[in-house]
Image (cartoon, rainbow, N blue to C red):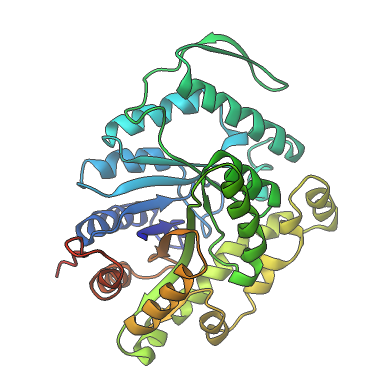
Amino acid sequence: MRFGIYCEIQTPPGKSHYDMIWEIMRQIEHADDCGFDVYSTIDHHFFQKFSISANPLAMFAAAAQRTHRIRFRTALHTLPLENPMRLAGMIAETDILTNGRLECGLGRGHAWLFGPSALPLEESRPRYDEAIEILELAFTREKFSYSGKYYNVKDVSVVPRPLQQPHPKFYTGGTSDVTYQMAGEKGWGIFVPPLLPWKVLEGPLNIYKKACTEHGHQPDIVYIRPVYIDVDEKQIRKEAEQALLNFLAFNASPVKSIKSEEKKAELRAKGYGFYASGALESLTRLTYDEIVEQEIGFIGTPERIIRQIHALKAKGGIGELAIVSNFGGLEHWKSIKIQHMFAKHVMPAFRAAGTDARAPD
C-alpha cells in the first residue's frame, strides 16, 4: 500500500495567501523527507475557505526542485474549464520539470465552479468527455485531428512530449456511478471523496472494481481521510477538534452559492444531483465524536490508526491511503507533527523490510 498526502489548501479568513502557499511547500519537503509516496493537491478557484490551489502544476514544478523522490498528483484537473490541447502541453512540461514524478487526476469539477467560470453547467459532461478523448490522442499520436461539438482541430502536434510514456498515470474521481464505471474500463486509478463514510462509497467502488476485472485492470483506489495522531487521545482532541470541524464546514461552504431552489433543480437536471442532496451540509452538523466514530477522520493513537488501515486493506482494491495533514486552518506545526508521527509510527507497520519510512527529528 502507498501512503500519500492530499491537500485542498483550505485557507481561513485572515490567513495570508503567501504564508499558506509557502507552508504547504515546506510540508511537501517534509513529506518527501519522511518517505511519503505522493503529494496530491486539488485544482480549485474562487472559494478561499475551500481552496486557494489555483495552479497545482506550478506548485509541483517548484516543489520538484526542492525534493528528491516524492511524486505529485493533481486531484483533479477540472477538464470542462480547460482547453485540452493546451493542458496536454502544460502537463508534459511539468512532467519534464518533475523528472517524471507527475500523475494527473482528470474530473468534471465541483458544480459551484461553473458560474464564476462563465461556463454553462450543461456543458460539463460533454466537454469533459471530449477533453478526455483529446488528451488520449495528444499523448499517443505525434499528430492528431479531432471533430466534436466543442473542439475541432486538424493536424495538431502537442509539444513538448512528456517524459513518461505515453503519459503520466491518469486518475479520476467523483460521486456519479458513470465515473466509476469509466475509470474501471480504462484502468485509471480513482479518488474517493474525503468526507463520505465507507457505506456510501461501497456501491460505487464495487462498480469500479467489477469494471476493472472485466477489462483486465488492477483496481487502484486512493482512499482519502483527514488524520490526527498522538499517543494521548485527550491531547488530540485539544489540538485538532476545531480544525476538524472547520474541515467539514470549509468543504461545504461553497454550497451557499448554489443553494436556491432554482439552482438545485438545475443541478439535478444536469448531472450534479449530489450538490442538491444536502449531503455536504449534513456533514457540518456532525460532532467531533461522530466524525471519529464514523471514521470520516482517522483520529487517534498510532495503534488505533494501524487497526483502521488494516481493516481498510481488507476491503480490497485500496492502492493508497492519502492522509489530509493540513485541514481547517490547522497550524503549520501541527501538520508537520501529523506527517512526522504517521511516518514514524504507522507507515513502518505496512512497509516491506528495507523500505521503512524515514521520520526526521
Q: Residue at x 29, y 52 (%)?
A: 25
Position of residue 228 relative to residue 358, above or below, is below
Position of residue 173 relative to residue 146, above or below, is below
Q: Quadrant of the C terminus?
A: bottom left
Position of residue 304 relative to residue 146, above or below, is below
In front of the other: 171 or 267: 171
149 left or right of 183 in image: right
Hey, which quadrant is residue 301 in on the image?
Answer: bottom left
Hey, which quadrant is residue 229 in on the image?
Answer: bottom left
Q: Residue at x 62, y 48 (%)?
A: 211
In front of the other: 164 or 59: 164
Q: Residue at x 58, y 44 (%)?
A: 183
Count of residue discs: 0
Looking at the image, the residue that sits furthest to the top is 155
Q: Quadrant of the N terminus?
A: bottom left
Q: Is residue 197 visible?
A: no
How far across and down, in percent of the image, does residue 77 sit?
Answer: 52, 40
28 left or right of 225 in image: left
How far across and down, in percent of the image, does residue 202 sit?
Answer: 63, 65
How far across and down, in percent of the image, does residue 187 sit?
Answer: 53, 42
Hey, which quadrant is residue 199 in on the image?
Answer: bottom right
349 left or right of 359 in image: right
Looking at the image, the residue that sits furthest to the left is 361
In front of the other: 34 or 57: 34
Q: Is residue 221 visible?
A: yes
Q: Residue at x 54, y 43 (%)?
A: 216
Position of residue 216 relative to residue 167, above or below, is below
How far across and down, in percent of the image, does residue 35 sit?
Answer: 24, 59
